[in-house]
């Protein structure tokens, strides 16, 4: 048969002590058997101080709840830490007892502990019963009260056990005030209180268990600053016993902690016994004495470690590679060689140097190598070394500590090298890196550790470095613009990307792919260009000018031209749709050489096309000279500003301008 595991059998039954003397004790005994299945009920025939001693001597076996009555119950309630439920006579008890007393004597007195309840007086007045009311505070008061009533001619006394015993010894008739019903009500109330106390104790135990497992120090205070709960973590910091702290003022246990408490809810940074803590203060709703306070002490170093961990995780998502090596479009032998090298180098952790003119796709190849390697699940962090001033580049690369310079972020900042931990650091335009930073980067590559600005503590890192440049670094080494030792540290594995003018068979497939991508962003084209094949059909009439152009800006320049073509096709297609139903057919022949010439005249420039006949070194110098002239124009002819922005000397500026012819 199935097991019968009733929850009531597995739980500890409440321990109830019924403390009574004289007639109340006998009444307890008469009904105790009714509660055998619900509680462990113990009858105590002691009162007042003797009962207090017996409860204290019980130790861990002390009762969960005490049931008592009259002055005895009031005495115990003020002197023991156990909840006390008082037996109180019901209205029916009073009416029944007075009715019995009136049968025995004409003069009746009702004696109660403390002031006679107002409802009892109202009840007696309502029924027109002639009753003398009397009350007492202690056993001595009770004896005096009984003797006084006897002298006043009272024949019968109605009251609790102590009073009726005294009245009997004084020769008076008595009626016991309490009934079985009032005792049952007291026992039932005791069970409810015991259950509530047990639930509260269980809740506190669970809360304490939670507090003890917290890594931070936590203390809960009542409205008067007394400890309601404290975990072991904070108790150890304060050097106090957590079990003895409850109920004592925090200002007495730890004055330095009390001074560190924020004035209002919120956070503050405080030093406690030589250790920095972030102290958070919040309200404790439902404390034993109104609204209290919860204090959380979190070690500042732990906050910093957590901040670094969170930043690392966020950067893992932020610094992600988007391209794969298969995204590199082209079928010429040079591009196929690039793919082969990328797949081969991805299995290694050695540094890769990617060479190629601007716009040839160096970062795409770097991302492809990262995606193929074992570090693919970690950050890919790219930085253009020529896009930042020297001071800013240094802080971006290496990070800084708080107070390292004016305007430094509070708490400091991790650099991009740290952000690339366990992943790949891509240094684009490495040839533009200032010489002072080259020496710091060399140390990072050699020692695999980075030191933030304003710090002396090195941070271990695990990164793979991929660098890229459009410059001839060997020439920069000869002129002293690039460190030879850094060059040899970078030049371990090599990939060289060919310029677009040397990849004529790939120009049309590249253009078609770029047009298809543009069509996906342009709703007016998306309905007519569903794949790269349809895009290639639209480019057929202008394929020859596209192939003959030298493309000094390489794929980036081709992408710009294709964007213009996409806008033109979208406008023509939209106009055709407005003109008639055959607009779609007209869109296929909308792109003609004349249209291309109007939107991209540089494609037909003979001077640009003549660049294809130059040697590699001449083409490189021509591109460099064009960049220098553009910089001169941007700086209004200020050669000092150009030299500073490009990181070259005036001699180098003059030599390269003249060498270009």
Image (cartoon, grey):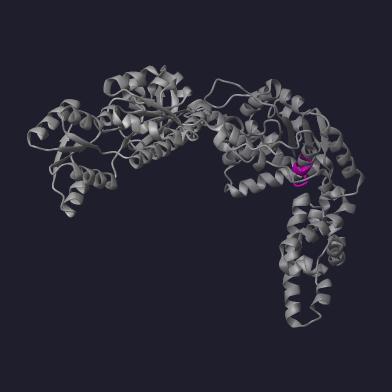
Query: Does the magenta segment cover residue 212?
Result: no
Q: Residue furthest front?
A: 104
Answer above or below: position of 628 versus 491.
Answer: below
Q: In this view of the protein, can residue 393 be seen by the observer?
A: no
Q: Residue at x 57, y 26 (%)?
A: 452
On screen, residue 429 above or below 297: below
Q: Is residue 365 magenta?
A: yes
Question: Which image quadrant: the C terminus?
Answer: top right
Identify the residue at horizontal 48%, vertical 35% (top origin): 38
Magenta segment boundaries in residue numbering: 359-366
Q: Which of these two is toward me, 494 or 101?
A: 101
In this image, 561 relative to 412: left or right? right
| Residue 57 placement (x, y as % from top left) | 37, 17
Residue 348: x and y, percent?
82, 29
Q: Main secondary structure of the magenta part?
A: helix
> Can you give x and y, in whole percent of width and height, for residue 414 in the image?
58, 32
Q: So how many labels did they put on this image?
A: 0
* Vertical order, 655 against 606 (above or below): above
Quadrant of image for the N terminus: top right
Which is more toward the observer, 398 or 543?
398
């Amino acid at each position: 048969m199935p097991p019968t595991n009733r929850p009531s059998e597995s739980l500890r039954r409440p321990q109830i002590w019924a403390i009574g003397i004289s007639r109340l004790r006998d009444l307890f005994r008469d009904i105790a058997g009714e509660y055998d299945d619900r509680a462990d009920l113990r009858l105590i025939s002691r009162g007042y101080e003797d009962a207090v001693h017996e409860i204290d001597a019980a130790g861990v076996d002390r009762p969960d709840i005490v049931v008592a009555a009259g002055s005895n119950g009031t005495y115990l309630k003020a002197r023991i830490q156990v909840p006390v439920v008082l037996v109180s006579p019901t209205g029916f008890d009073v009416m029944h007892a007075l009715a019995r007393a009136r049968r025995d004597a004409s003069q009746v007195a009702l004696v109660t502990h403390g002031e006679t309840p107002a409802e009892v007086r109202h009840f007696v007045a309502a029924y027109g019963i002639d009753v003398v009311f009397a009350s007492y505070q202690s056993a001595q008061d009770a004896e005096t009260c009984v003797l006084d009533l006897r002298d006043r001619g009272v024949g019968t006394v109605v009251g609790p056990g102590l009073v009726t015993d005294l009245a009997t010894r004084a020769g008076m008739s008595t009626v016991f005030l309490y009934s079985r019903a009032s005792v049952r009500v007291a026992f039932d109330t005791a069970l409810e209180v015991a259950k509530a106390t047990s639930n509260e104790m269980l809740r506190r135990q669970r809360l304490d268990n939670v507090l003890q497992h917290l890594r931070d120090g936590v203390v809960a205070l009542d409205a008067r600053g007394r400890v309601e709960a404290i975990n072991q973590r904070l108790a150890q910091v304060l050097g106090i016993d957590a079990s003895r702290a409850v109920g004592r003022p925090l200002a007495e246990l730890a004055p330095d902690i009390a001074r560190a408490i924020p004035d209002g809810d919120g956070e503050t940074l405080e030093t406690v016994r030589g250790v920095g803590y972030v102290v958070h203060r919040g309200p404790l709703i439902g404390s034993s004495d109104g609204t209290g306070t919860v204090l959380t002490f979190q070690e500042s170093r732990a906050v910093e470690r957590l901040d670094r961990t969170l930043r690392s995780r966020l950067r893992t998502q932020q610094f992600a590679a988007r391209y794969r090596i298969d995204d590199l479009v082209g079928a010429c032998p040079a591009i196929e060689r690039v793919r082969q090298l990328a797949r081969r180098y991805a299995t290694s952790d050695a540094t890769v140097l990617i060479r190629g003119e601007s716009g040839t796709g160096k970062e795409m190849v770097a991302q492809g190598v990262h995606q193929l390697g074992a570090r693919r699940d970690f950050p890919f962090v790219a930085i253009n070394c020529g896009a930042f001033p020297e001071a800013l580049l240094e802080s971006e690369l290496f990070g800084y500590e708080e107070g390292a310079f004016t305007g430094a972020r509070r708490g400091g900042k991790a650099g991009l090298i740290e952000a690339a931990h366990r992943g790949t650091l891509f240094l684009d335009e490495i040839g533009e890196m200032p010489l002072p930073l080259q020496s710091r980067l060399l140390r990072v590559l050699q020692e695999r550790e980075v030191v933030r600005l304003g710090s002396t503590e090195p941070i271990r890192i695990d990164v793979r470095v991929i660098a890229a440049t459009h410059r001839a670094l060997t020439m920069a080494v000869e002129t002293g613009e690039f460190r030879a030792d850094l060059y040899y540290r970078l030049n371990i594995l090599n990939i060289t990307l060919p310029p677009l003018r040397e990849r004529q068979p790939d120009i049309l497939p590249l253009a078609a792919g770029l047009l298809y991508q543009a069509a996906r962003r342009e709703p007016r084209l998306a309905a007519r260009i569903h794949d790269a094949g349809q895009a290639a059909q639209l480019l057929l009439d202008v394929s020859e000018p596209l192939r003959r152009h030298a493309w000094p800006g390489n794929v980036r320049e081709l992408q710009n031209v294709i964007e213009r073509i996409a806008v033109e096709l979208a406008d023509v297609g939209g106009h055709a749709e407005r003109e008639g139903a055959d607009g779609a057919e007209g869109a296929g022949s909308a792109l003609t050489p004349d249209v291309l010439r109007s939107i991209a005249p540089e494609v037909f420039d003979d001077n640009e096309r003549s660049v294809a006949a130059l040697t590699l070194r001449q083409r490189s110098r021509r591109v460099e000279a064009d960049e220098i002239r553009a910089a001169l124009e941007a700086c209004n002819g200020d050669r000092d500003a150009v030299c500073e922005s490009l990181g070259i000397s005036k001699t180098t500026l003059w030599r390269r301008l003249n060498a270009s012819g």
